[in-house]
């Protein structure tokens, strides 16, 4: 781990605190949006959008994905592709019929 | 978490007691042999279940000779098999053959034993996890076997465990689910270990394009196990909830069983299970076949004494095959009333995935061209693999297209098709692997004459079993029939084939006897061999037979590709990968 | 015999063994939860009616739990950073806090479950509750698993710090990766089950 010298640890810590604040803010935001009781379609898009930002923050900073070399991002890219295939193909027909 | 402890491992083998050396060993070679023996026994057991079923199919309703009395009153009163018992045998035959036989033999045994040697590694990356993976597999096997003793017997809803039937089936189904949890955990631990080992522990100079094809096959297989099994685990959780917590994930509203409405909230869907199940089970067929292809490729290169024809196409096809295998699964579900949009998608992906399969087969066949072939026993099995897999693959094409699949689905045609892939396909390749690597594992060679008897007998019998299934299937005979179709008018013309197939199945058993004798006798009495009895190039032959703890006495370095046979100008007709010359 | 790259990074791949191992494991976990989310979508789109999460579930408790779990992720990564900076005492404080927050999460989750049961709401009641209990239950099991690892690293496992600090730091990093993943799953579970 080239990034584990005491020197960068301090900048790391600062980033963690900022990410923490952002996560709390986004949690507040998604709950408040839910209180508006929007239509299901809108609510789904907004909630998943916020959740994706939160998730990316966790992955990029807490899980150090930003500083990983190629191997792990490639692995995750494939996994995410299969994840969406699994998620969406079984229901694809319902969507394509507009149900 | 997933960390190895190699500290207590450094002490060398003399200091480890009996338990650590043979039973709870962390040495990949011992674990590989444990996997080999256990899975061969399971194959034999699964085959025995089928031989009992074949009696019922050949002589419906007649008492089973010899063993009929021992099957229990609940299963076969007066030795006559009950339909419920037939269903248990069928479901468990499929489950055992796939999850406890072929996969553990191809991956757990050969992958474990050969792969670290071929990449020049001292062991697996996580030896402790490797040991756990075997024992969890063992626990899964015990659970599956033990389920025969439960009230109502073992699982009886087919190896596919389709709900709603499986949701309301006897308790054996719960045991099946728990057994599957064990097996999924085992293959998860194994696949992580395999991938990390291949990526991290390659010897200096062993670049990816110098990996023996067998290692590539194991790598892709591990990814399939890693990413395709979890959705089945999710599905198994849901089915367990349905069975134990009374949920209705797979139970539609208003389901009627035996004339009564089922007391459940409803709102679920049996199709959900099928999606999650086949998301695993299609990649699973590549898990059954890829290690086999890896073995065949190594043996062909070695026995034709020339490099594989286009190693690169082999590698890229395998990678592409692995990728595509995740998005073809619903070709098993054409008859579920799938709409044309989705149906088109899956038909197209299925036709696309057949391309790399054909490329792989073509590469292997063309590799024979112009070789000075040595017809050793492993080579005979490897050569037979090619046309057998070809038949299996070609008969699969009509099943990938909805218009032809709909009449063929759930007939014996399907049974014939996939058995050509897994029995004279995978299993022949696995036999080839046993004959090929036996000298490495034991320091002795298996007998060639017994090997050839085993080969010719098996080849003839296995084709006599599975070829007639296509005929029956095309005549419309359904699979999973307790009487083999005797009740149906449309089956009458092809009914006599049942006896032919059954006799062939029992004869097949007889031709396994030379193999079993050969195996055990050769361990003690086989002809002694040196490090490299086949004049092979890959690294497993660059160490002693059997290799020591830690695999290589001196550090290995790799200078060349995996199959450099008959290189012009070289002193011998093979150049080992670690030969700097 | 020594397995290479247990604590040092392999130059051409850029990772040590356990880090690749845990990421592979997490990839499989993505597919495990993927299967369940897929089930959720399949059942919901096929259902005649589907309740809004907020009509049945307790939003304030779940929001609190979200904050608890996010905080535990921060303390987890701080525990690793302390170790990477060579401060063992600070590492222990942060990891201890992480475990405590894990306990808090489970306690609140338990309260929620208890309240549902009191109102006669069980997995068998309807498909929404069935998937709610399955998803949160499985997630809860993951939390418990992570806590066991963390307690081990706090207690007997921490002896390694003196013998092989690099390897111990790696272990904490690996445990952290898992713990953040559990947090990440919750970040999606919360809106999907409670807010939609
Ligand atoms: C060579 C010996 C074998 C024979 C004689 C044999 C025979 C059969 C037969 C006749 C059936 C149809 C039973 C029915 O529909 O009622 C069947 C089903 C099946 N076999 Fe085999 N088989 C053999 C080996 C294998 C192997 C090696 C595998 C897998 C690797 C396998 C996997 C299956 C599966 C998955 C089923 C479907 C079970 C179900 O309907 O749920 N078989 N086998
Ligand atoms: Cu398929």
Image: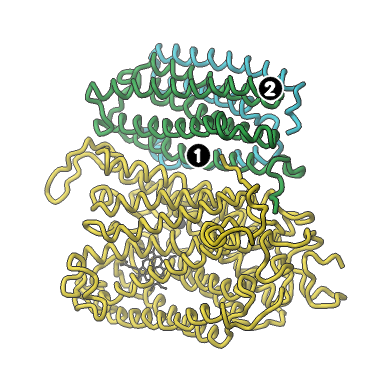
Chain colours: A cyan, B yellow, C green
Q: Residue at x 53, y 73 (%)?
A: B431
- Density class for disc 1 (Cα within 10 Å; few <14, some 14-19, many ≥20) is many
Q: Residue at x 70, y 58 (%)?
A: B119
Q: Residue at x 44, y 82 (%)?
A: B513
Do residues under tags 1 and 2 come within 8 Å of each other at their CB atoms? no
- Density class for disc 2 (Cα within 10 Å; few <14, some 14-19, many ≥20) is some
Q: Is mark 1 within 8 Å of ligand 2?
A: no
> Which corner quadrant of the figure contains ligand 1?
bottom left
Q: Residue at x 68, y 15 (%)?
A: A14
Rendered position, B507 above or below B481: below
Rendered position, C62 above or below B229: above
Q: Quadrant of residue B469?
A: bottom left
Screen quadrant of the N terminus of chain C: bottom right
Q: Estimate the x, y position of residue B166 in percent, counting from the top left.
A: 28, 51
Q: Chain of mark 1?
A: C
Q: Quadrant of residue C57?
A: top left
Is any part of residue B323 visible from this angle? no
Depth check, front residue: A35 or B60? B60
Q: Chain of mark 2?
A: C
Label drawn at residue C87: 2
Label drawn at residue A96: none
Q: Estimate the x, y position of residue B54 in percent, counting from the top left.
A: 30, 75
Q: CA distance from mark 1 to mark 2?
A: 32 Å
Give the structural element (helix, strand or loop) at label 2: loop
Q: Which one is earlier in the sequence, the residue at label 1 or at label 2?
A: 1
Q: Is mark 2 within 8 Å of ligand 2?
A: no
Give the structural element (helix, strand or loop) at label 1: helix
Which residue was labeled with disc 1? C29
Q: Estimate the x, y position of residue A95 in percent, counting from the top left.
A: 41, 35
Rendered position, A1 above or below B25: above
Q: Quadrant of residue B120?
A: bottom right
Q: Are marks 1 and 2 on the same chain?
A: yes
């Amino acid at each position: 781990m080239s990034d584990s010298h005491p020197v960068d640890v301090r900048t790391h810590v600062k980033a963690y605190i900022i990410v923490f604040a952002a996560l709390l803010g986004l949690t507040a935001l998604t709950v408040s949006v839910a209180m508006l009781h929007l239509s299901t379609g809108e609510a789904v898009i907004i909630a998943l959008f916020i959740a994706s930002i939160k998730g990316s923050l966790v992955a990029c900073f807490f899980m150090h994905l930003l500083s990983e070399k190629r191997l792990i991002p490639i692995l995750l890219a494939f996994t995410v592709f299969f994840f969406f295939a699994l998620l969406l193909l079984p229901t694809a027909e319902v969507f394509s019929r507009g149900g | 978490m997933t960390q190895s402890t190699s500290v207590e491992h450094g002490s060398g083998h003399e200091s480890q007691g009996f338990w650590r050396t043979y039973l709870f060993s962390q040495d990949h070679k011992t674990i590989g042999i444990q996997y080999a023996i256990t899975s061969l026994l399971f194959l034999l057991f699964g085959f025995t279940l089928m031989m009992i079923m074949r009696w019922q199919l050949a002589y419906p309703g007649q008492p089973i000779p010899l063993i009929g009395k021992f099957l229990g009153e609940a299963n076969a009163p007066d030795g006559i098999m009950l339909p419920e018992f037939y269903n248990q045998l069928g479901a468990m035959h499929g489950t055992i053959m796939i999850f406890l036989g072929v996969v553990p033999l191809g991956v757990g045994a050969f992958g474990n034993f050969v792969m670290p040697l071929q990449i020049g590694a001292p062991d697996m990356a996580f030896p402790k996890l490797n040991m756990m993976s075997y024992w969890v597999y063992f626990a899964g096997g015990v659970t599956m076997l033990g389920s025969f003793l439960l009230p109502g017997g073992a699982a009886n809803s087919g190896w596919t465990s389709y709900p709603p039937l499986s949701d309301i089936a006897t308790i054996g189904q719960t045991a099946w689910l728990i057994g599957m949890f064990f097996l999924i955990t085992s293959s998860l631990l194994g696949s992580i270990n395999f991938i990390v080992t291949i990526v991290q522990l390659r010897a200096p100079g062993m670049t990816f394009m110098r990996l023996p094809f067998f290692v590539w096959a194991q790598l892709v297989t591990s990814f399939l196990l890693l990413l395709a099994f979890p959705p089945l685990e999710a599905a198994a959780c849901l089915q367990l909830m349905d069975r134990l917590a009374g949920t209705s994930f797979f139970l539609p509203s208003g389901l009627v069983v035996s004339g009564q409405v089922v007391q459940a909230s409803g709102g679920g869907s049996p199709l959900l299970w099928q999606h999650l199940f086949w998301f695993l089970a299609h990649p699973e067929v590549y898990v059954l076949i890829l290690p086999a292809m890896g073995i065949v490729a190594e043996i062909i290169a070695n026995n034709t004494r020339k490099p594989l024809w286009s190693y690169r196409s082999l590698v890229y096809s395998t990678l592409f095959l692995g990728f595509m295998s995740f998005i073809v699964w619903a070709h098993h579900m054409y008859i579920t009333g799938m709409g044309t949009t989705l149906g088109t998608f899956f038909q197209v992906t299925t036709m696309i995935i057949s391309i790399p399969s054909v490329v792989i087969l073509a590469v292997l066949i063309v590799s024979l061209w112009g070789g000075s072939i040595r017809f050793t026993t492993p080579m005979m099995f490897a050569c037979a693999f090619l046309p057998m897999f070809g038949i299996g693959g070609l008969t699969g094409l009509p099943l990938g297209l909805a218009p032809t699949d709909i009449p063929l689905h759930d007939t014996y045609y399907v049974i014939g098709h996939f058995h050509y892939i897994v029995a004279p396909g995978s299993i022949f390749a696995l036999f080839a692997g046993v004959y090929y690597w036996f000298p490495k594992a034991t320091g002795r060679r298996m007998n060639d004459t017994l090997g050839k008897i085993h080969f010719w007998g098996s080849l003839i019998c296995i084709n006599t079993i599975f070829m007639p299934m296509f005929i029956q299937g095309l005549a419309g005979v359904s699979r999973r029939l307790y009487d083999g179709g005797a009740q149906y008018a449309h089956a009458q013309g092809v009914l006599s084939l049942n006896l032919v197939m059954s006799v062939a199945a029992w004869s097949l058993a007889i031709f396994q006897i030379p193999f079993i004798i050969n195996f055990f006798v050769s361990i003690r009495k086989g002809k002694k061999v040196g490090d490299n009895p086949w004049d092979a190039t890959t690294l497993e032959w660059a160490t002693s037979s059997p290799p020591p703890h830690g695999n290589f006495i001196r550090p290995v370095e790799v200078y060349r590709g995996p199959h450099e046979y008959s290189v012009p100008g070289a002193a011998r007709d093979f150049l080992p990968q670690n030969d700097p010359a | 015999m020594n397995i290479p790259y247990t604590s040092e990074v392999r130059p051409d791949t850029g990772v040590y063994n356990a880090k690749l191992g845990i990421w592979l494991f997490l990839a499989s976990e993505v597919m495990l939860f993927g299967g369940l989310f897929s089930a959720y979508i399949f059942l919901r789109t096929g259902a005649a009616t589907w309740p809004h999460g907020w009509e049945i579930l307790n939003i304030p408790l779940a929001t609190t739990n979200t904050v608890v779990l996010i905080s535990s992720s921060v303390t987890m990564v701080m525990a690793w950073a302390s170790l990477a900076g060579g401060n063992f005492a600070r590492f222990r404080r942060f990891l201890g806090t992480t475990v405590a927050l894990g306990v808090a999460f489970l306690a609140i989750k338990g309260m929620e479950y208890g309240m549902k049961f009191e109102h006669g709401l069980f997995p068998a009641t309807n498909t929404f509750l069935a998937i709610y209990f399955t998803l949160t239950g499985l997630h809860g099991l993951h939390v418990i698993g992570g806590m066991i690892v963390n307690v081990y690293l706090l207690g007997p496992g921490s002896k390694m710090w003196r013998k092989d600090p690099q390897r111990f730091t790696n272990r904490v990093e690996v445990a952290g990766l898992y713990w953040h993943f559990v947090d990440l799953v919750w970040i999606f579970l919360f809106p999907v089950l409670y807010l939609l």
